[in-house]
Amino acid sequence: MLYDVVSGIIEGECHVQKTTTLSAAVLAGMLSITPAMADQQTPETDNINEVPAGNYTIDPLHSKITWGVDHYGFSRYEGQFVDLSGSLRLGEDPADSNLKIEIPLDKVLTGSGLTEHLQGEDFFNSAEHGTATFTSTSIEIDGDDEATITGDLALNGQTHPVEIEAEFNRGGVYAFDEKYHIGFNGEATIKRSDYAINYLMPEDDKQGISDEVTLRIEAEFVPEKAQ
């Protein structure tokens, strides 16, 4: 009887050892697969077609719009809009995507005392119209990294179509926050007269502040769930 008891204990220990060994092997296999799966979900790429489709949110720390005007022919004057907010719904086909960006006009930067003047009634009238909004209406893809984004820009109580010539920079995990980022830049030109911003407009042969305003856009997005 003692022999049977000892034999049973030995067999039990062997079974536990085998089960433990098997479980460890399965766990090791899962761990070895996980990085590969993660790489598939967060590909390092400069091809927009390889970026996972889904909802993305703008990263306000690394996004801005730099605007520029001609100042009486003397110089090119520039400022920035910062603290942007917005979203990108990236479709399986990037041409089926949607973009919406909100620009807080009270966050305009000039680095000078002109900031307060720009927020007044002569320019942005931010007390009455505090936010400008761009909403895409169509996206035409040109190759793997360029697109023309057409949309409506609402500014100072006026809404007009605007085209942005956009370029996809890259997608990848940003080492600082360990989140997946996708980055773009773009350029557009608008006429401020379309938005009833007519202060110091050039007239006839008189110099002034140019009607045309150039916009240079830098934007990074992260997956919505990563916020």
Image (cartoon, rainbow, N blue to C red):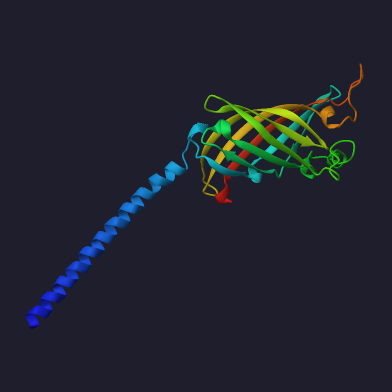
Q: Relative to 141, does residue 13 appear above or below in the rendering?
A: below
Q: Which of 32 and 174 is in front in this view?
A: 32
Q: Is residue 227 visible?
A: yes
Which residue is outermost to the bottom? 1
Q: Which of 95 and 78 is in front in this view?
A: 95
Residue at 46% across, 43% down: 41
Q: In which quarter of the image is residue 7?
A: bottom left
Q: Is residue 46 visible?
A: no
Q: Is 58 placed left or right of 104 in the picture?
A: left
The location of residue 110, given as percent across then percent down, is: 79, 38
Q: Is 163 placed left or right of 72 in the picture?
A: left
Q: Nearer the viewer, residue 46 or 100?
A: 100
Q: Quadrant of residue 195?
A: top right
Q: Is 163 placed left or right of 116 in the picture?
A: left
Residue at 67% across, 39% down: 100
The location of residue 204, given as percent across then percent down, is: 92, 17
The location of residue 128, given as percent across then percent down, is: 86, 44
Residue at 9% across, 79% down: 4
Residue at 24% across, 61% down: 21
Q: Which of 197 and 75 is in front in this view?
A: 197
Q: Quadrant of residue 214?
A: top right
Query: In which quadrant will I find the N terminus?
Result: bottom left
Tally the numbered discs: 0
Which residue is outermost to the top? 205
